[in-house]
Amino acid sequence: MNQETEKLQQYQKLIQARNRFTIGFASLPVFVCLCYYILKIFIPIQGLVFVLTMIVGIFGYIFVMFGFLMKDICPWCKQHFFFQSNSSNSRLMKIHSFDLFFRKHCGHCNEPKQD
Ligand SMILES: [Zn+2]
């Protein structure tokens, strides 16, 4: 198997990971609402239920984001594929809102060039 085929396979996995991330990102509010209603049955204190739901929601998003960021590596340039780091501050992530969910080319090297 040549290197280019291998990179394209990694790219396919990256796109799959992004699709899973999109589903996770979209279904998390539903999950959080469900969590709220379930907790409300067991805990009579309204404020506590709200705080617990917020914690679950925040951790859920952190979990989904980090899981995705771990996989978000371009097979070609080894930089972030979907996230673009700002040139003035390389640690600062720049997310192009909805572009993230539809992006098919790397934000740094613009690979894959075909299709
Ligand atoms: Zn790249």
Image (tube, grey):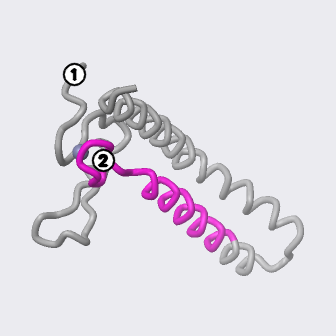
Residue type pointed to by label 1: Gln
Residue at the right extreme of this rendering: 42
Q: Which mark is residue 81?
A: 2
The amino acid beneath tag 2 is: Phe
Q: Quadrant of the N terminus?
A: top left
Closest to the observer, 57 or 2: 2
Q: Position of residue 25 (x, y in %)?
A: 52, 49
Q: Position of residue 114 (x, y in %)?
A: 22, 22
Q: Quadrant of the C terminus?
A: top left
- Closer to us: 110 or 63: 110
Query: Would you say residue 80 sits in the magenta stretch?
Result: yes
Q: Is 5 placed left or right of 54 in the picture?
A: left
Residue drawn where x is 17% and y is 63% of the image: 86
Residue visible at 30% across and 47% down? 81
Q: Quadrant of residue 12?
A: top left
- State the SS at label 2: loop
Q: Quadrant of residue 39?
A: bottom right
Split into quadrants, the picture shows ligand 1 in the one at top left
Q: Residue lying furthest front in this view?
A: 1
Task: Classify mark 1: helix, strand or loop.
Answer: loop
Residue located 34% across and 27% down the image: 2
Compute the Cα span from label 1 to label 2.
16 Å
Estimate how packed mark 1 is, as few (under 14), some (14 to 19) or many (20 or more) residues with alpha carbons within 10 Å. few
**Was residue 38 drawn as part of the magenta stretch in this picture?**
no
**Foreground: 28 or 92?**
92
Q: Can you say whether 100 is above or below 70 in the image?
A: above
Secondary structure predominantly adopted by residues drawn in magenta? helix
Image: magenta residue range: 53-81
Reading the image, the residue beneath label 1 is: 114
Residue 77 in the image, given as x and y percentages of width and height? 23, 48
Query: Disc 2, ligand 1: is the CB inside 8 Å?
Result: yes
